[in-house]
Image: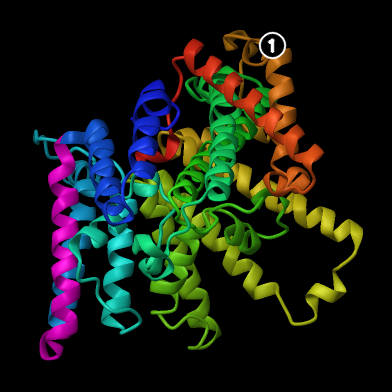
């Protein structure tokens, strides 16, 4: 079940809302937990056992770590290995075993391990809880239903944002949540914005990218290569930020305030700034639990550079079991290291004028777009050829071109691309918080129209994937 489906929009969510607001506050957590289990089971019933196991193991471990100080380190390491081991087995076993077969030239058949939906997200949430309990930053949750709701809450269960327990600890107590009409309206508006991003922009731009990336890089001209790279960059942004908007909006409807996950990343002027604005929950997770644990910037300049490169390599690996994700992470890590090397205390003031700002922005967009070509490619060979094409370094045979650029894009696509570029800037920031009856009325009418249009597009289009469900 996905948020942008009729089943969710017109059956699951309306029924849950009626039951939730009709229920006594003391039963609302149980209701949300049952709804979350139903939501996950509808999407991936066969892997519910793993979700339950992660909940139970980390719940018990948190209590035991707090109670038995003498065995604290042993219990922490054991549970850490169980969590990481589950993630490695289910997410990377097929890749690692295929790599082994390729290196050893062994011909062996094996049963492929199915990737459970959302495993990267809910295990990272469990790990953040476990680490914070071990470091005495939070007290363990002793109510298994509340802990299970933290791990399983359906808005962010399968594709984030990654929520830290300490950020919503108080909100897990239903009496401390603000379940009121204002939160309902704000959440609904945020959900509609996310739904529109996903259905009206990401899905349509995704069709452009898919038509290009499905072909060999020598089958289309340079202009089409750049079109595909830009289209995919916008697709993944609107797909994932749209999902995050929907998750944050749904959380707000039920009284939870989740952290923002995107903050207009394409207006950045460096890769470092980009990652403070892109997938913020993942960036802060690696910063808080890996980078700082490695020593951060406290162990000398060379060690700082190593820590940065290591963390972004892990970030790439987190995204999936493919060499392309590893190289994508290293790609960003190299530029983060480069920026750290050339930065000085006075550089910002010395280079704070128009042309340099513009070139920094161009640099950022170029690195990000080229990086997403690697991210999108099926393998490194394809990525390398695609990048060669983008810069005119690939030998092309015009006779092999299957289609010209007008096959990939029409006037409506141009309009959607233009809208996507415009909306990716802060031009419409905070529009759901506008004051004044006239402005509010205009925004509300506009959002209702967007919702209706989104529903129409869902009805007429079968193309409706969520990219980050793969991770």
- Residue at the image position 50 percent from the left and 19 percent from the top: 215
Residue 156, above or below 176: above
**Residue 209 percent coordinates (x, y):** 56, 25
- Residue at the image position 15 percent from the left and 72 percent from the top: 61
**Residue 20 percent coordinates (x, y):** 35, 43
Residue 218, quarter of picture: top right
From the viewer's perspective, is 438 left or right of 71?
Answer: right
Which residue position is annotated with label 1? 406
**Residue 387 percent coordinates (x, y):** 59, 37
Image quadrant where one finds the N terminus: top left
Question: 112 or 123, which is in the foreground?
Answer: 123
Image quadrant where one finds the C terminus: top left
Q: How is the structure coloured here?
A: rainbow
Query: SS at mark 1?
Result: helix
Please indicate, yes or no, whether residue 2 appears anywhere in the rendered image: no
Question: 106 or 222, which is in the foreground?
Answer: 222
From the viewer's perspective, is 83 left or right of 244?
Answer: left
Category of crowding for the residue at label 1, using alpha-carbon neighbours closer than 10 angstroms: few (below 14), some (14–19), many (at least 20): few
User: In the current view of this chain or complex, which residue is farthest to the bottom?
Assistant: 70
The chief SS type of the magenta part is helix
**Residue 183 percent coordinates (x, y):** 54, 50
How many numbered discs sit on the rendered protein?
Answer: 1
From the viewer's perspective, is 414 left or right of 304?
Answer: right
**Magenta segment, which residues?**
46-72
Residue 230, above or below 340: above
- Residue at the image position 76 percent from the left and 53 percent from the top: 361
Q: Is residue 55 magenta?
A: yes
Residue 57, above or below 414: below
- Residue at the image position 34 percent from the left and 52 percent from the top: 121
Please indicate, yes or no, whether residue 357 appears anywhere in the rendered image: yes
Q: Is residue 10 magenta?
A: no
Question: 437 or 421, which is in the foreground?
Answer: 437
């Amino acid at each position: 079940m996905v948020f942008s489906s009729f089943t969710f929009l017109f059956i699951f969510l309306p029924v849950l809302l009626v039951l939730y607001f009709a229920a006594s506050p003391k039963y609302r957590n149980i209701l949300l937990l049952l709804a979350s289990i139903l939501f996950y089971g509808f999407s991936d019933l066969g892997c519910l056992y793993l979700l339950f196991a992660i909940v139970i193991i980390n719940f018990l471990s948190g209590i035991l770590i707090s109670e038995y100080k003498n065995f604290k380190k042993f219990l922490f390491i054991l549970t850490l290995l169980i969590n990481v081991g589950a993630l490695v087995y289910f997410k990377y076993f097929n890749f690692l075993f295929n790599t082994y077969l390729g290196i050893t030239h062994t011909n062996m058949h094996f049963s492929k391990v199915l990737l459970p939906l959302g495993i990267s997200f809910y295990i990272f949430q469990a790990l953040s809880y476990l680490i914070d309990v071990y470091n005495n930053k939070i007290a363990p949750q002793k109510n298994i239903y509340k802990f299970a709701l933290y791990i399983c809450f359906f808005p962010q269960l399968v594709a984030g944002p990654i929520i830290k327990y300490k950020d919503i600890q108080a909100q897990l107590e239903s009496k401390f949540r603000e379940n009121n009409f204002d939160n309902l309206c704000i959440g609904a508006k945020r959900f509609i914005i996310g739904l529109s991003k996903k259905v009206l922009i990401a899905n349509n731009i995704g069709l452009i990218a898919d038509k290009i990336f499905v072909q060999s890089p020598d089958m289309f001209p340079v202009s089409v290569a750049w079109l595909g790279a830009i289209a995919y960059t916008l697709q993944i942004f609107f797909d994932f930020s749209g999902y995050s908007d929907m998750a944050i909006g749904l959380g707000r409807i039920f009284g939870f305030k989740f952290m923002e996950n995107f903050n207009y990343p394409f207006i950045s002027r460096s890769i470092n700034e980009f990652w403070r604005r892109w997938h913020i929950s993942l960036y802060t997770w690696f910063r808080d639990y890996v980078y700082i644990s490695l020593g951060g910037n406290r162990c000398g300049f060379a060690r700082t550079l190593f820590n940065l490169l290591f963390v972004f390599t892990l970030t790439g690996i987190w995204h999936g079991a493919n060499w392309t994700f590893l190289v994508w992470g290293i790609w960003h890590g190299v530029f983060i290291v480069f920026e750290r090397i050339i930065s000085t205390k006075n550089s910002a003031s010395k280079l704070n004028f128009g042309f340099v700002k513009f070139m920094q922005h161009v640099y950022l967009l170029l690195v990000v777009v080229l990086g997403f070509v690697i991210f999108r490619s099926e393998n490194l060979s394809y990525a390398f050829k695609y990048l060669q094409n983008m810069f005119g370094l690939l030998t092309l045979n015009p006779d092999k071109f299957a289609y010209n650029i007008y096959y990939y894009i029409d006037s409506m696509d141009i309009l959607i691309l233009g809208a996507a570029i415009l909306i990716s800037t802060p031009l419409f920031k905070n529009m759901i918080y506008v004051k004044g009856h006239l402005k509010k009325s205009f925004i509300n009418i506009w959002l209702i129209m967007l919702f209706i249009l989104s529903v129409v597009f869902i009805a007429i289009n079968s193309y409706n994937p969520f990219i980050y469900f793969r991770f």
